[in-house]
Amino acid sequence: MRKAADELTTYLGCPRKYEFKHVLELTGETQQNRDAFRKLLREVICTGYNTARQTDREPRKGAHEALESLWKSYVETADHHSRRQESTEKARAEAGLEAYFETVGPTHLDGIERAAELCERSVVGPDLTLSTTIQETQVSVTVDYIMAHGGSLVAVRLTDQLWASRVPYASDSEIAQEHLEQGLYAPQKVGTVIGARIAEQALGEYVADGTGTELMYLSVLEETFETDGDCEAVTDQQRMGEFLTESRQTIDDAIVWMAENIAAGNYDPVDVFDEQSHWDGSFEQVVENSCQYCPYAVGCQEAIRREVMFNV
């Protein structure tokens, strides 16, 4: 069974949370508005590129038209507390689109055209699935589009804010080894590196030897500010290749370790984190860093057990 990078990230954070979310398919408390807003931005940008490729229109215009078309349905599902919040959010979305297409739009469109020729397939999503096999384990990662850039094939994953999405900083170049081999607890950051490793290998199946492959996270709304009554935005990006330089084998081994545990139905975090040797950490780190924010804590036996424990 193929495992997505987002699923592996959940398991890396806590196997019990993986069970609730991906096996039992329970719905916990979510950041529904934030997720929907991010999805909206990704969809309108990809629609802009698809429109441009099909009709020779400017992608910026197509994206803004898509935003107008999809905004009403987005508002109906979002939980806005006031019209002011709704209008402010739309202004941010419009500013993000402007900043994005002003900064990278035409360059990325050219890259998308070249990638389509190289890959001989559709290269614009959103939610474009890249699949591959790592050590006989089938894995996948979703991206928003693929472009050719210099001598590389680059998969792009869009978000509303880069660092809020747990993308590692450049100074975190050894984050995978620090988490998996030294016991640091940073599952979300390591999850983005796992996704980058999957994308790197999956893209390599479309190109000849010598062409580089890489995943890039791109923030549409890294910063927003008002000037002269208008909202403006600043984009940012992080290419993920530097996080793979010394850690490919470590990441591949971790992918197999998690996949084997999942296949065996092992969702006991104490067993996985305290009694298995692959991760040099402990379940106590999960408790200290993750449990208080977990949307499934109310039904988690480990959490309940801690609540009823007392010392005499």
Image (cartoon, rainbow, N blue to C red):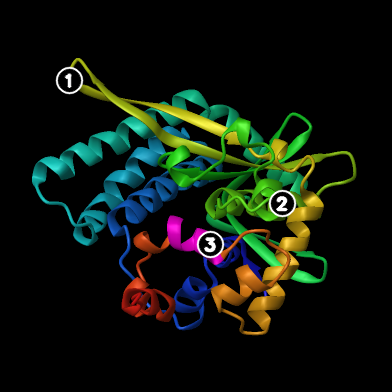
Label 2 neighbourhood size at 10 Å, few (<14), some (14-19), many (20+)? many
CA gap, disc 2 and disc 1:
43 Å
CA gap, disc 2 and disc 3:
18 Å
Residue visible at 51% across and 72% down in the picture: 18
Q: Position of residue 228 (x, y in %)?
A: 19, 15
Residue visible at 73% across and 55% down in the picture: 251
Judged by depth in the image, the label closer to the viewer, 3 or 1, is: 3
Mark 3 secondary-structure assignment:
helix
Give, as a three-letter code, the residue at label 1.
Answer: Gly
> Which quadrant, please, contains the C terminus?
bottom left
Residue identified by numbered label 3: 13
Q: Using the image, tell me which numbered label, if any, was put on residue 229.
A: 1
Q: Which of the marked residues, 3 or 1, is nearer the chain's N terminus?
A: 3
Q: Position of residue 111 (x, y in %)?
A: 65, 35
Judged by depth in the image, the label closer to the viewer, 2 or 1, is: 2
Q: Position of residue 254 (x, y in %)?
A: 72, 62
Decide: marks 2, 1 in contact (CB < 8 A)? no
Q: Which of the marked residues, 2 or 1, is nearer the chain's N terminus?
A: 2
In this rendering, position of residue 8 left or right of residue 17? right
* Secondary structure that dominates the magenta span: helix
Give, as a three-letter code, the residue at label 2.
Answer: Arg
Q: Which of the marked residues, 2 or 3, is nearer the chain's N terminus?
A: 3
Q: Which residues are magenta?
A: 283-289
Mark 2 secondary-structure assignment:
helix
Asked if the magenta segment contains residue 286, the reply would be yes
Which picture quadrant has residue 249?
Answer: bottom right
Q: Is residue 130 above or below residue 52?
A: below
Residue visible at 40% across and 53% down in the picture: 39
Q: Position of residue 287 (x, y in %)?
A: 45, 63
